[in-house]
Amino acid sequence: MRCCRNSLKFYSSSNLCQAANTSLLGLLRLTYNHSFYSNSHNKDFARLTSDTKSIQAGLTQIFSAELLAFANRTNIPAAKLLCYNAALCRRPHFGISSSNPQSTAFSFRESLMQHLTALERRTAISLALVFAFRMLGLFMLIPVFAIYGKDLIGFSPLWIGLAIGAYGLTQAILQIPMGWLSDRWGRHQVMLLGLTLFAVGSVVSALADSVYMVTFGRVLQGMGAISGAVLALAADLTREEQRPKVMAVIGMTIGLSFAVAMVAGPLIAEAAGLAGIFWFTAVLAVTGVLIVTFLVPKAVNQARDSEALAKPGFLIDLFRHRQLLQLNAGVMILHLLLTAIFVVLPQQLIDLHLESPEHWQVYLPVLVAAFVLMVPLMILAMRRQQEKSYFLFAIGLLIVSLLLMINGQQLSWTVAGLLLFFVGFNYLEASMPALVSRIAPAGQKGTAMGIYASAQFFGAFLGGVIGGSIAGYYGLVMVFAVAAGIGLLWLIIAKTMQVPERAQRLSFAVMVPDDHTARHYAELLSQLTGVQEATVVVAEQRCYLKVAQGAFNLQQAQDLLATGIVPEQKA
């Protein structure tokens, strides 16, 4: 750091060099934000731009490859990044103090984590819209096809289920590969390809006069599996500490899209028929293409973050991971149950003298009330630290709700059952991804979440097939009975589930020449107090840690990584 002080002397006034000396790897993912940059910082900018070589040397010494990598991905001049951070460090509310250098890096990093930059906000909103439009188009068929598909050639309960769940099969198969394809072709190209396939599938279904062509159109819709590319682009355009926020915004659109689809589907089908839903879906797909083309930011380079992206090398091990296998089976069963009951539920409501245009009057209050009732369950589970008990309770709610819906002679029983079902469904849908994130080995969360999402969509396909088959041979009521039996099987499996203690995930840039060195560092890091798991990925030049909150000493890990000692190769 001596050469850094010589080439960037004005930084001593902002204590930045002192912070870098104390915790070099603590200052990660610093970024330029137009909302903070003003004319008052022009003096610093002039000093920086006057000596380009000093700038590059200072960047390399202070921030290693972290700041330059972010600058390259977002196409922001490195000089502006460094200037912005110099001015930002002098802001009093960041709490940087030379009297307490130990906390300097932490306070600086914590303050940065509180706000998304303009680029990150734009990324979150635009990608969430693209995701929402696509999921809305997929979900709107669920509450109406059993009713409005009766005029199609070849209509039967089995084909109802196939048409509703067909998208899940191709979505499950292509979920992870489309993400890998975006590494080669580019994120925007894969997203545009997926949305185009989605639009083509919608048009095919809109023009279809048989249930077979509708099902084929749904298969094409599922082939536009852009989830992997969307999440990969979100990783490219966001800082690591802000990435969970952006991912959460995108993930929230699934639940919101489902709620809107349950209300909008029956209304659009009543006004324009089944074809009207598919034409509306095609319009959503074209709108998504326009958003990707003109609003979604473009990344110059790609992030290589195993915590956010699926990696081929981890697939086999994670498929065998017992705890993750339980959760993957669980989410598959959860969406199997959801799809199966909607193969028969719309017809049951009509049998109870509630016409299709009025179905939203059941769905909307049920979904709102279920969300309101789910929130206290989440709070109590975390506050009492009884997550497993509440997890099992939620599965129990699903079973009870399905037993209530077996009594199809009274609307009140059906509505009560539907309410309980969505209370349990919402709780499980919100809690299981968090459990996957906690259980996934360090550096493998992206792959674990990719497998989880594939299981989720495959469950939708199975639900359509099972629900349609049972309804065709044994009647509507038997679908609820079999679904309750499947839920009971899940409850038995879930009783053996182990909920891990809460952990924090950290990652650092490292320099490791080979796998032998990577294993050595992983072993040393694993021996540190509070470290639960350590993974060093040579291809990414990064170290991933899972650490116990409050028990981990960050400085020890940084000191270990800063030694640069390379172990000798064994003969």
Image (cartoon, helix red, strand yellow):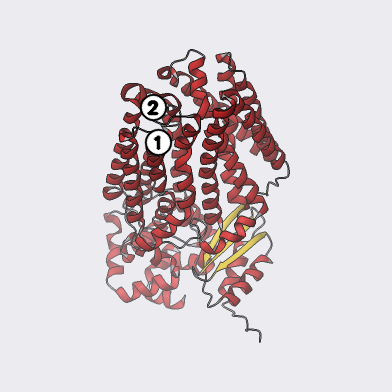
Alpha-carbon distance for marks 2 and 1?
A: 9 Å
Q: Mark 1 is on which residue type?
A: Leu
Secondary structure under badge 2?
helix
Does the rendering let one see residue 441? Answer: no
Question: Looking at the picture, does residue 72 appear above or below residue 503?
Answer: below
Question: Looking at the picture, does residue 366 appear above or below residue 181?
Answer: above
Residue at the image point whose x is 65% and y is 34% from the top: 487
Residue at the image point whose x is 67% and y is 35% from the top: 390
* Depth check, front residue: 505 or 20: 505
Residue 377 percent coordinates (x, y): 62, 32
Assess disc 2: are there few (<14), some (14-19) or many (≥20) residues with their C-alpha within 10 Å of its C-alpha.
some
Quadrant the C terminus occupies: bottom right
State the mark number for residue 136.
1
Q: Name the residue under label 2.
A: 264
Quarter-of-image position of residue 151: top left
Residue at far front of view: 154
Precedes in sequence: disc 2 or disc 1: 1
For the residues bearing labels 2 and 1, Cβ distance under 8 angstroms? yes
State the mark number for residue 45.
none
Left or right, 515 with reference to 38:
right
Assess disc 1: are there few (<14), some (14-19) or many (≥20) residues with their C-alpha within 10 Å of its C-alpha.
many
Does the rendering let one see residue 322? Answer: yes
Residue 197 percent coordinates (x, y): 34, 47
Q: Mark 2 is on which residue type?
A: Ala
Left or right, 441 with reference to 238:
right
Secondary structure under badge 1?
helix
Residue 166 percent coordinates (x, y): 46, 41
Question: Looking at the picture, does residue 489 appear above or below residue 528?
Answer: above
Quarter-of-image position of residue 87: bottom left
